[in-house]
Amino acid sequence: MLKPLSRSKWDFRTAAHLINRAGFGAPPSEIEKIEALGPEDAVSHFVDFEKIPDTTPNPEWARPDPERAEMFLTLRRASEEERRQKLRAVQRSDREHMMELRGWWLNRMATGPRPLQEKMVLFWHGHFATSVEKVREAYLMWRQNDLFRRHATGNWLEMLVEVAKDPAMLIWLDQGQSRKEHPNENFAREVMELFALGEGHYTEKDIAEAARALTGWSYERPRQRFLERPMWHDRGEKTIFGRKGNFDGEDFLQMVVEQPQAPRFIMAKIWNFFAGEMPNDAITTELSGIFRKAGNSFKPAIHAMFLSEEFYAPNVIRNQVKSPVQWLVGSVRVLERELPPPMLCFTLTRNLGQDLFAPPNVKGWDGGLSWITTNNLLARYNEAAALVKGDMSGSVAQMVNNPGVNMQIERRLRNLPAGRVDVSKLFAEKERSDAEALIGALEKRLLQDKLKPRQEKALRDYVASQKQLNDDAVLNAIRLVMSTPEYQVT
């Protein structure tokens, strides 16, 4: 049984752990506020996020286009050249909207009032890995992102049904063209293998029969919406998980959620995402029981997870390699600086191995140590210098050398203002003038922990070599800490 974290074990370090995992990190002043709340109220602050107003506006274009259906009719009557020109214009607009969408979401993570909600959206994005490379429509990617936000900690069956009817998913896994004559098995297979049960908990017969149940769930491209096509649906008897009946898609998904393995699979994956390692059998059983008792809703189990002593165990705290998105968003938060412009964020996270809205495959990103390769680690060190000193020339050079960047975007990139970190905002005057105080302040802000002896010696040697601790020296010291192995984990 999960053991509640005692008040005596709640301190700056455990509060930092909560804010790092339930959110994207924070400067010391915010961590101290969370610490002062105590464990119960601190966890509620993150988990009960719907109590916190969120007035973040959606992108201006994030709505169905009333002229889109008319455009498709016009294209049918247009010449081949007119059709190509119009489609190129639509594709160019979608590329620009996707760049804006990445920046919009990163900004929600970095500055939004509901960090856990955005962290859950990031989890679901990796779980239901859907790529714009195939979907190709920015509005559909935003719509799926919004779906994950609305159902972030809600009911599992409700989310699965909405995901199954989501236009981006219908395109991504080819469900939109599945009909009774030729049922497509992609979505049925992935629901059981990757989304809800895991290998070994279904048969090939279950997949084939579930695909039949899902026929008729389709996508109306001109209006960018889900469409149920009754004439495409297989109304015959199916046998799924040993049960016989004239099942449809919702019947199938309900049967999936009812499987004994269903709560164990999804709760283990959520624990792994937040704790950085797979749970043991006892933790999985406990969380699954809470999940089932709550009617397959996630919030009570997540609340219990964040309040458990097991979540703050020594092998859990600071054992998780930061994903590129976590690294970027967490860095701008602890450095108390703005995010770079969306185009540069796109280049930066892609260089580090994570392209938002374009996961590598249906399994999403592997995470963990896979984030750390020789090239990616070097890129982290270089990007740390860029964030600290405001010199984005390296990322700009990569962007303007990209064939997809037009001349107008290139001019905007070339004229981006440098925005280096304001050290006076991060450190008190004594910390900026006293070597020992500076080292302690750097560790507290950037790591909430001590450097390993080797890295600490390198930092001390650098600080000692400076004739005076001016702003440049402090900025270099920040960069040194961000280039240590300790900074790559949270």
Image (cartoon, rainbow, N blue to C red):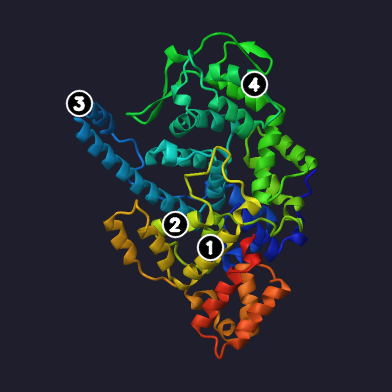
What is the distance, in whole Å, between disc 3 and disc 1 at their CAs? 50 Å
Residue beneath disc 4: 204
Spatial separation of the CA atoms under disc 3 and disc 2: 39 Å
Looking at the image, residue 277 lies above or below residue 331: above
Q: Which amino acid type is marked by label 4? A: Glu
Q: Which residue is rendered at x = 52% and y = 44% of the image?
A: 359
Q: Earlier in the sequence, mark 3 or mark 4?
A: 3
* For residue 84, above or below residue 122: above
Task: Please tell me in which quadrant of the rendered image residue 371 appears.
Answer: bottom right
The residues bearing labels 4 and 1 have C-alpha atoms spaced at a distance of 43 Å
In this view, the residue in front, 172 or 55, is 172
Residue 89 in percent (x, y) is at 26, 42
Who's the residue at 58% across and 9% down the image?
237
Q: Secondary structure at mark 3?
A: helix
What x and y, as percent, mark residue 298? 63, 39
Residue under numbered circle 1:
379
Label 2 vs label 1: CA separation?
Answer: 11 Å
Of mark 3 and mark 1, the one earlier in the sequence is 3
Q: Circles 3 and 4: CB distance less than 8 Å?
A: no
Whether the residues at callouts 4 and 2 have beta carbons within 8 Å, the answer is no
Question: Which of pointers 3 and 2 lies earlier in the amino acid sequence?
Answer: 3
Q: For numbered disc 2, what is the local secondary structure?
A: helix
Q: Looking at the picture, which amino acid does disc 2 mark?
A: Thr
Amino acid bearing label 3: Arg
